[in-house]
Amino acid sequence: MLESKELTKKFGAKTAVDHVSVTMESGHIYAMLGPNGSGKTTWMKMAAGLIKPTSGEVLFAGKPVGVESRKEVAYMSTEPYFYGWMTIEDAGKYYADFFEDFSMERYLNMLHAMDLDEKEKIRALSSGMVAKMKIAVTLARDAKVYMLDEPFNGIDLMARDEIRAAILKAAVPEKLLLLSSHLVEEMEAIADRAVFIRKGQLVEVRDLEEMRESDGVSMADRYREIFSHREVQA
């Protein structure tokens, strides 16, 4: 479904993603794990077709990502991308103008399930409420791939529960979900596969159930093994 081949991205002298080759299949929830600055966001933005690689390529359904793949890939960035004067409902209308697969009905249902009022102004929302709105507006698309960058960052425990429920509901066999995070404990309860990335380089991709059975370690245990002696990130 989604594949990168020797994918590399440099920003001046800094290599953010370094020859990463990985294949992700539908029917799974992948956790892309690594400390801040490890290249997760840069990889996802290239997979979403938002920035161009320095070298290598990303393929969606066997074809290079581009205008057509954006119709099938729903990406949620960490940056704010709505105007403060908008209401939560306006954000949905904004998405509906851009994406034919956006469902306002699904969006409103998710908002209400997460206890959000669509008439609220975005400028008046807490960070947790904005996070829930961003999840809802992304998952309200009928995409083949959902990529959520740091969906739990800065979110309180109750909001995390609501976000987790929304993500799990979207996980159906024909979809691929990719979540990037440094909050390993949250990912442990959601993902079935883990992509460990360190200093822009792929360390390994693991089936989590198989890893627990064969190695006797959890995802958090494996994360500590890989990153316990990491260098301080810039």
Image: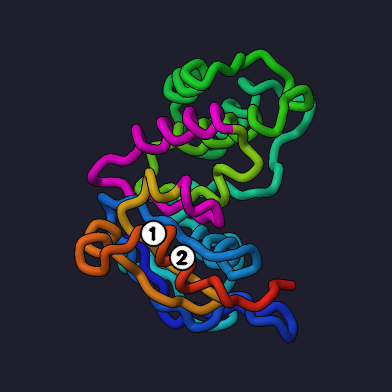
> Is residue 97 in view from this perspective?
no
Please, is residue 203 above or below residue 66 in the view? below
Residue pictured at 48% horizontal, 25% vertical: 107
Secondary structure of residue under mark 1: helix
Please, is residue 174 above or below residue 155 in the view? below
Q: Residues within 10 Å of mark 2 (few under 14, many from 20)?
A: some
Residue kind at label 1, given as amino acid type = Met
Q: Quadrant of the C terminus?
A: bottom right
Quadrant in the picture for residue 166: top left
Q: Residue 36 placed where, x, y %?
A: 64, 63
Closest to the observer, 208 or 83 = 208
Residue pictured at 39% horizontal, 68% vertical: 59
Q: Residue 126 placed where, x, y %?
A: 72, 28
Residue bounds of the magenta highlight? 157-186
Q: Which residue is mark 2?
A: 223
Task: Identify the residue at the far bottom of this view.
Answer: 13
Q: Residues within 10 Å of mark 1 (few under 14, many from 20)?
A: many
Q: Residue 116 placed where, x, y %?
A: 58, 18
Q: Which mark is residue 219?
A: 1
Q: Residue 131 placed where, x, y %?
A: 61, 35
Query: Is residue 166 shown left or right of residue 131?
Result: left
Secondary structure of residue under mark 2: helix
> Is residue 94 in view from this perspective?
yes
Labelled pair 2, 1 in contact (Cβ < 8 Å): yes
